[in-house]
Amino acid sequence: MLNRQLVRFNNQLIRLFCLAAALYGFSAVKAQLPPRQWAQHYGGPGVDIPFVIKITSDGGTVVAGYTDSKSGDVSPQPGREYWDLWIAKLDRCGTLQWERSFGGSGYESARDVLQTADGGYMVLGETNSTDGGVVAGFGGTKDIWLLKLSATGTLEWQKRYGGSGLDIGNHIEITADGSYLIAASSSSNDGDIRGNHGTGGYTDGVIMKINAAGIVQWSKCYGGSRNEELFDIEIINGITYLAGFANSIDGDIPPNQKNYDVWLLALDNNGNKVFSKIYGGSQNDVAYTMTKGADGSLTLAGYTTSTDGDVSGARGSQDFWILNVDQRGKLNWQKVLGGTDAEYAKTIITDSDSTYIVGGITYSTDRDVANPLGEGDFWTIKLSPSGQVLWQQNWGGSANDHLRFMVHNPAMQEYYLAGDSESGDGDFSNALGDADFAVIKLKIPQVLTLDSTVCNLSNFVPFRDTLLDACGYDSAIVDYRPVLLGGPFDSVRKADTIFAGQQVTLHANGNGSIIWNAHATLSCTDCTDPVASPLATTYYTATNYLPNGCQVSDQFTVVVLNDAMVFVPTGFTPNGDGKNDFYGPVGKVPDGYKMQIFNRNGELVFRSTNMYQLWNGTYKGSIQPSGVFIYLIDYKDMQNKPRQQKGTFVLIR
């Protein structure tokens, strides 16, 4: 199993974007590091290692891995002798909402988690227990373990998959049909695992498809006679891409594989191989993670110890290796990053601006590593779509801090880094045990420009404000621009017509504070939109004012009619100059309105049942020529009696 000890990897993501100048807009801010909102440890006095963090539908996160703690944030488990699977639910402020541990007297761990449509969780991992409530399996070795939890962490059901060998679930992905794909590694060739290419304990990459109830639909092995493993899944246009490493030179692995190479496997919907590609040099090259780019390409990340083949630009003993390929597996570009000591890239995301953020661990203090903090740091790097470094940042404290996973909430411009930390200083201040779940939240503040109403533009002093979110952290940067105090009816109607006995709501549009002059027929005077109930035509005065004393007043006219009123113009000029381009009556009727317009041949060229729906001078899409037209208008008066007006008008071109 390719030196899992080497993967002592508990690192996370980004010190993204600083607070940038607001008026440069969102894309300008993205070119910089975002500020850290909070950093927190979770766990107990023992070792607590997370492998995954995901954003949940309530805006919080769920973190999963393993624990051997028996106190602190971790609920005691009577049968805990080694690792138990541990899952923790956090709100968006980082407060622990609930936690659950599951396992027996053996070793359990969560490797992946995703939220289901019912608000619960699928938790994928491994177990070698047969007690403590763990479902029976296939002997004393590790099996793939899948737990279905409710939204509050209650165990609803569990499944165990594998055979008599070593079986580990690495990643779970939902498919378009509501089923799930599990990427795993296995040395079994019995039970749920059939067709393993390896012998003597060597592992194949395994893909297992299960339905929503956890029932296996099919399971297939891919690899050769030596070690292969699959860690990540991306589904693009019906093709399933899997990333990992290969050590064989036979079976599904191209014969030019040299030692341990990055492996990219493409399958169709039924698990049939579309292609199998390897990338690397003469030493060890591994991909732990990948992401789909905005251009549809795939970018894989892991580590390399090679200096030849597909690898160029080696920095030290072991470096981040990032490679971009198209959907057919053609290598577009590669990037080696690090220092003279060891680095592992464990997580990668595609950012909202089509760039990539890569995260992992660094032990170096030189070369590409600019600001080392301790023995090992969370290390994050932002790359352009073509692989150019835009920024890099270390996170952690003076001890070992290992970044393992990061996620991005594009809608909120939030980033979460999860890994394990032994530090109680630097970015972290609350160490709990030997190693803790460690989560860092980063957020790009929203950039806003808001109006500031003033009496005089020349006296305005520009200023900036920072707004806090519900957690008390910076959420938005606001720049204020001066706008002169306007009239209370600017950009809105200043008059309306009603019939006797009706009411009307008066709308003001002031950019200051609105107050209406007192009037017996107004419902209120200190509200923006009072209701008026006049018995006759009435003028209402509203004032838009600022507390410092400047104000602007204007009048709103409500015309009260005792019966229907219809005024019909004698002509119109629909030439597109914005004046008199539409034809129809002016006035107001209680009910039954209908207007018909006929040409000289008696053809009906326009019909309307709404006084605000006017004729534009066309018929069946054709512009009508100058000439005389006939109108016929029907309506009902206040006594509900039918009325009719008819006559002629002139269309002038």
Image (tube, rainbow, N blue to C red):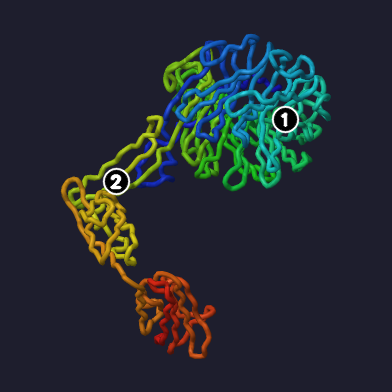
Sequence-earlier tag: 1 or 2: 1
Task: Say whether residue 449 is left or right of residue 640.
Answer: left
Q: Secondary structure at mark 2?
A: strand
Q: Is residue 441 above or below residue 635?
A: above
Q: Could you say where residue 186 lies in the image, as x and y percent from the top left?
A: 76, 25
* Residue 222 in view in this figure: no
In the rendered image of this protein, does residue 246 appear above or below residue 298?
A: above
Mark 2 highlights which residue? 480
In percent of width and height, residue 564 lies at 36, 73
In-front residue for pair 129/361: 129
Circle 1 packing at 10 Å, graded few (<14), some (14-19), many (20+), is many
Which amino acid, by three-letter code, is at mark 1? Ala
In the foreground, 562 or 197: 562
Residue placed at 56% from the left, 31% from the top? Answer: 54
Kindly state the secondary structure of the residue where label 1 is placed: strand
Residue 68 occupies which quadrant of the picture? top right
Q: Which mark is residue 246?
A: 1
- Residue at figure coordinates x 18%, y 53% from the top left: 551
Position in image of residue 592 (x %, y %): 45, 72
Q: Position of residue 640 (x, y in %)?
A: 42, 72
Mark 2 belongs to which amino acid? Tyr
Q: Quadrant of the N terminus?
A: top right
Residue 468 in sight:
yes
**Residue in view at x 66 percent, y 30 percent:** 171
